[in-house]
Image (cartoon, rainbow, N blue to C red):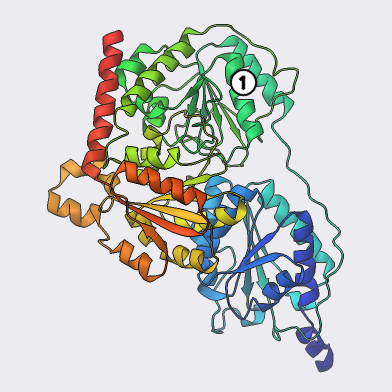
Amino acid sequence: MDKKSANDIHQASPYPFAIRFFTEMKALGVTEVAVSPGSRNTPLVLAADATGLNVKVFLDERVAGFYALGHAKVAKSPVILVCTSGTALANYLPAVIEANHSGVPMIVCSADRPPELRQWGAGQTIDQVQIYGTNVRWFYDLPVANNTDPSQAQNIALRAWDRSVSGRGPVHLNWPFREPLEPMSDLEVPKANLKPFNAANFSDKGAQRLMELGKKYENGLISVGPNDLDDDAIEQICRFSEIVHWPIISDPGSQIRGRAISETVITSGEILCGSVPFTESLGSTEVVVQIGLAPTSKAYKRWLKENPPEHHVLISPIVDWVDPSNSITEIYQGDLFFPHSESTKTLRTHSAWLEQWKKGNAIAASAVQQHLQDDRNELSIVNAVIEGADDEVYVMFSNSMIIRDAELALQNNGTNYRTLCNRGANGIDGIISTTLGASFGSEGKVICLIGDVATTHDFGGILASMRLKADMTIVIFDNGGGGIFSFLPISNAIDKEHFDKYFLTSPKLPFTDIFESLGIDVSTPDTIKELKAEMKKTISKSGLSVIYYKSDTDATLRAFRSIRDTFDQEISRKA
C-alpha cells in the first residue's frame, strides 16, 4: 500500500458507519441516548444527534448509567450510553451490574483509541476490552469505524438490540476511532432497513406443565419477586393462582401489592414465613412456581431453603438461573402466558391450604395496622407515602432498610401505583439517578423513598435532576445512618462505640440547608399527618421537590418486633 492510500484510510470519516448504527437503533425502538462529554466519542455524540434521537447530556457517567437503568425499567426499551475512552466507562459498572442481575436492557457504546495506540502509553488509553466481564450479554470490539463498510453497522445494531432486549440485560460495544474526530462535511442520515421485533413469550409447553402440577398438587404457592411486570402479566399470574388455588407470595416491588385484584395475594410473606408457629402448622409444600427474581423477604428464602418443595419451577424472562435456595427443579425462559382455552378452567373449588395462608395474612395485616400511626417508625412513613400515591405514580424504593420497611408496611389498599427498585445487585448507589431515568421514561409522577446514607451516595443524581428539570419527589428518611445494622446480630455482638463508628456511619449532613442552597423546594414535616398533607401537595404539582423526614431506628425496631410477637401469639392461640 502506498503512502497516499494509507493516509486516505486514516482520514476517512467515521460518520457514515456511526450514523447507520444509530439510524437502525432508532428503527428498532431506541428513543433515548445518554452521553457524557469527551473528545474521542465525538462521532458517536454527533451521529446520535443527527438521527433525531433524544440525546441527554450527563456530566457524570455513573449518574448516566443509573439514569439509563431507570428509564429502561419504565419504557421497556434500552437506553444507549455514550462515553469517551479511558476511565469514563468504568463509572458505568455499578449500573451495568444492576442491569445484568435485574434483567434490564442497556447498550453501552464506549469510544476507544485505535489499535495502534493501545498498550503504548497513549493518553486516556486503558484496556477497555471485556472491561465489564461476565456482566454483559454480549461484548464486541468494533473495527475502526473510519475505514469500515457502513452496512456492517446494521448487523451490529441488530445483534446488540437482540442480545440486550431478548437477553434482558446490558451489552457493550467498544468503538475505536482515529482522528480527525470532527465531521468534514454535512451529515447525511440514510433510510433505516430494520424494524422492531419482540422476544418470544412463555411457551404453550410451559403453560401445560404448570396446569399438570396444579391438577396433581394442592399445596403449591407462587412467588413473585421485584419484577417490572405489566398489567397483562399480573392478570395472568393472579388468574393462574385462582385456578389452582395457590397463594401468591408477593414482593413489595412485584407490581402486585396494593392492587387488591385477587384474594390469593399474600402481602405479609415475611411475617408468615418467619413465624415458627405458622410454618409448623403448614403441611409440606409440594410446588413452588417462582416468577423472575426471588422475593426480597429473608424469612421466605430461609423457610424455602429449610423446606424445599418437590417441584420448584422457575419462569424467568432473563437467562440467569435465579435460585438462591438451590432448589429449582425446572426452568422456563420467557414471560408467563396461558392460552385462552386453559385460562378458563378452575381445578378445585376449595383449598384448606390456601385458606390457611389467607387467614395468616389477615392476622399479620392486622398486626401491622396497629403500628402505622406512629410518627417515628418507618413503617408509618412508607405507608403515608403510599397512601398519597395515585394510579399514575411510580414509587422507587431504595435498598437496605427502605425495601424491608415496604415489605411489612405495604398491604392491598386498592391502588394501582407501580413500584421500582434495584433488586438485582441490591446496592444503595444510584437510587436517585435511577429515579431520574424513570421520570423521563414514564408519563406520571415518580416518587423516590431513600435513606440518608443512600442519598449521600448520589448527590450527582440530584444535580442532574435539577439540570434536566425532572418531575419527581425525593422522600428522605433520616434515621441517623445505617439503620438496617440495628436489625442484625452485630448490633448486640459489639459495644455501642464500635457499632456506631463502623456500622451506623451517620452522614450528619445538613440536608435541608444543602437543598435550599441549591434552590430545591424542600419541606420538613414532623408528623405522619403533616407528611400525608405534603404528599397530597407534591402529587398535584410538577417539578423537583424534596421531603425530609426524621425517623427513629429504635422505634422501627420495636415495631418490627411487636408485629412478629403479636402474630406468633395470635397464631398459637388459634392453633
Question: Vertical placement of 136 versus 260: above or below?
Answer: below
At x 54% / y 46%, what residue is drawn? 102
Quarter occupied by residue 123:
bottom right
18, 23: nearer the viewer: 23
As shown in the figure, which amino acid type bears the numbered disc 1?
A: Phe
Most distant residue in the bottom direction: 3
Task: Judge left or right: residue 315 versus residue 560.
Answer: right
* The quadrant where residue 377 appears: top left
Please rate how many residues cluster around mark 1, counting C-alpha atoms within 10 Å: few if below 14, some from 14 to 19, many from 20.
many
User: Which residue has dot 1 on it?
Assistant: 240
Q: Quadrant of the N terminus?
A: bottom right
What percent of the width, then of the height, locates residue 373? 30, 35
Q: Position of residue 187 (x, y in %)?
A: 80, 78
Residue sitting at 48 percent across and 13 percent down? 354
Percent across and percent down for residue 86 are 54, 75
- At 54% from the left and 29% from the top, the residue drawn is 290
Quarter where residue 319 is shown: top right
